[in-house]
């Protein structure tokens, strides 16, 4: 099992070029969970809060 941080390539902020993937303060970046799944269910299990209640914020 790798511990490679590859959440960025699933992140809409990177895809929309709002983020260059180099930030250090992003919780998702270092999170062992799968951001792709989080986005589908729109829920962060790590913070137990809803993700992106609007398309843009
Ligand atoms: S659980 Fe939360 S912090 Fe972790 S990848 Fe999902 S949304 Fe990001």
Image (spheres, helix red, strand yellow):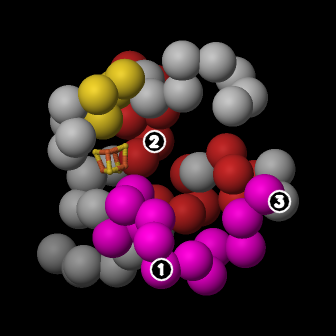
Residue 32 against residue 52 in the figure, above or below: below
Q: Mark 2: give few (<14), some (14-19) or many (20+) Cα within 10 Å.
A: some
Total labels: the figure holds 3
Identify residue for label 3: 17
Q: Label 3: how many residues lie within 10 Å, few (<14), some (14-19) or many (20+)?
A: few
| Side of 18 relative to 3 (left or right) | right
Magenta-span inclusion, residue 21: yes
User: Alpha carbon of mark 1 to alpha carbon of mark 2: how far?
Assistant: 19 Å
Nearer the observer: mark 2 or 3; the answer is: 3
Where's the N terminus, which quadrant? Answer: bottom left
Asked whether 45 falls inside the magenta stretch, the response is: no
The image position of residue 9, as x and y in percent, is 59, 61
Establish whether ligand 1 lies closer than 8 Å to the Cβ of label 3.
Answer: no
Q: Place residue 48 in its image quadrant.
A: top left
Numbered range of the magenta stretch: 18-30
**Label 1's element?**
loop
Quickly name the residue at label 1: 24
Q: Position of residue 41 (x, y in %)?
A: 38, 21
Query: Which-is-in-front pick, marks 1 and 3?
Result: 1
Residue 10 placement (x, y as % from top left):
56, 51
Residue 44 in the image: above or below residue 6: above
Which residue is found at the position 22% from the left and 40% from the top?
47
Is 10 situated left or right of 33 in this image? Answer: right
Q: Residue at x 38, y 35 (%)?
A: 37
Check residue 14 in the rendering and tell me which mark sits there, or answer none.
none
Q: Label 2: state its secondary structure.
A: helix
Q: Label 2 belongs to which residue?
A: 36
Q: Is residue 25 above or below residue 16?
A: below
Q: Residue at x 39, y 57 (%)?
A: 28
> Mainly helix, strand or loop, the magenta region?
loop
- Indicate the position of residue 18 as horizontal and vertical percent values: 78, 57
């Amino acid at each position: 099992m790798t511990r490679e941080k590859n959440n960025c390539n699933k992140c809409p902020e990177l895809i929309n070029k709002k983020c260059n993937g180099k930030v250090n303060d992003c919780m998702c970046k270092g999170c062992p969970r799968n951001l792709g799944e989080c986005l589908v269910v729109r829920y962060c299990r790590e913070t137990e809060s809803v993700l992106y209640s609007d398309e843009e914020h």
